[in-house]
Image (cartoon, helix red, strand yellow):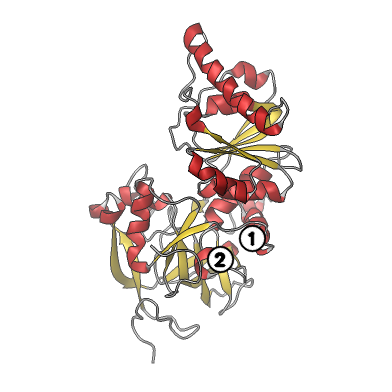
Amino acid sequence: MTKELYPIGEAPPLGVVPPKMHAWLIRPERFGEPMKAFAQEVIDVPDIAEDEVLVYVMAAGVNYNNVWAGLGIPVNVIAARNKAGEREDFHIGGSDASGIVYKVGRQVKNVKVGDHVVAHCGSWQKDCPMVRKGKDPMYDNSFRIWGYETNYGSFAQFTKVQDHQLVPKPAHLSWEAAAAYMLVGATSYRMLTGWAPNNVKEDDVVLVWGGAGGIGCMAIQIARAFGAKPIAVVSDASKVDYCMKLGAIGCINRNDFDHWGMLPHWKDQAAYGQWLKGARGFGAAIWEILGEKRGVDIVFEHPGETTIPTSILVCETGGMVTICAGTTGFNATLDLRYHWMRQKRLQGSHFANDEQARGLNDLVMAGKVDPCLSRTFTYNQLPDAHQLMYENKHPSGNMSVLIGATEMESGKTA
């Protein structure tokens, strides 16, 4: 007889879906820091549509998007969904997951009950205009980040996903490691491979900002897998060895320079000259690593406001600066003389499509990209993991939380 609710760590019989589940919920009245925003509740297991899959979550990844969800800024995701017609007054986050398929919709053909899977976080309407036109569904108005812009993410015993979001779990990885890499890895994969003719190639020089961070550690490995030469930018010397072991050919400590920030106006000759001196010094550090005076073919950007001026300057003629975030701010300033005269590209990039998620997963399955799991938390410690991220005290690499899995197979517990 099916129980109404199974305790955390006790899996229902394969394919048996109980009516209730445990989950970590965010509600508007609790908006704030993660330790306040997240609370354990028992709710109904969600229904699935014909093209959806219900996955029993074994482990979930930790990403900053659900720090934002808990704060209610920069977007109140609950209010946004309510405005669009959804009724739930709560948010279940989690945009990375590894787990076991427990139920499939009538139209699902690519997975079956019992499959071990990893979910990527890109969702869109299956018959959306971009898909019908044969174009990238990432550009469609229906595109959403599962577990952030959509509800019922991986911070619960069961999550629902669209069938195309699922890829095979790499057999050599633990549940917690398999939950740690997809969001950051697929984001990095698109940034480096999705923008021809500036897609990463053998012997390309790739400058990776935040080389020891979640997307940075993925970018270093992806670049090396394609035969490129990644150079990591780090915030302190303690992160150098970590980046070198991942495949960086050299590291630059950004704290050795003080010219960061928005670009001074070009008419302010004194201030602009001081900035240019610092930026050229940073470029010289790149030359020293390379052993030659040349620019960077691809700059892997995400700090934004404080670094874009320098990124544009050190980019090679015909090269590309690809950016997926603005962690230091959103006002990008640049000297257009260096941009148009040397025909450089500033390319925005956001997560990945199915093909790119599979491309990243293939590299992981082949052992060419490691998830860089640095710390694993128990189910009860889920808010603690997000609080560390909120306070910028999280370790290098990526973090996971055990959901259905009760025993850690790899990594370090909190």
The amino acid type of the residue labelled 1 equals Val
Q: Residues within 10 Å of mark 1 (few under 14, many from 20)?
A: many
Q: Choose mark 2 or mark 1, whichever is in front.
A: 1
* Separation of marks 2 and 1 at Cα, in angstroms: 12 Å
Disc 1 target residue: 364
Q: Residue 35's spot in the image, x, y percent?
A: 28, 55
Name the N-terminal-most of marks 2 and 1.
Answer: 2
Tags 2 and 1 in contact by the CB under 8 Å rule? no
Mark 2 burial class by Cα count in 10 Å: few <14, some 14-19, many 20+: many
**Residue 73 % position (x, y):** 34, 44
Give the amino acid at mark 2: Val
Q: Is the residue 150 above or below the residue 297 in the image?
A: below
Q: Is residue 290 left or right of residue 349?
A: right
**Along the viewing direction, whichever of 76 and 240 lies nearer the viewer:** 240
> Mark 2 sits on what residue?
118
Question: What residue appears at the point 36 percent right and 76 percent down from the top-left corner?
Answer: 8
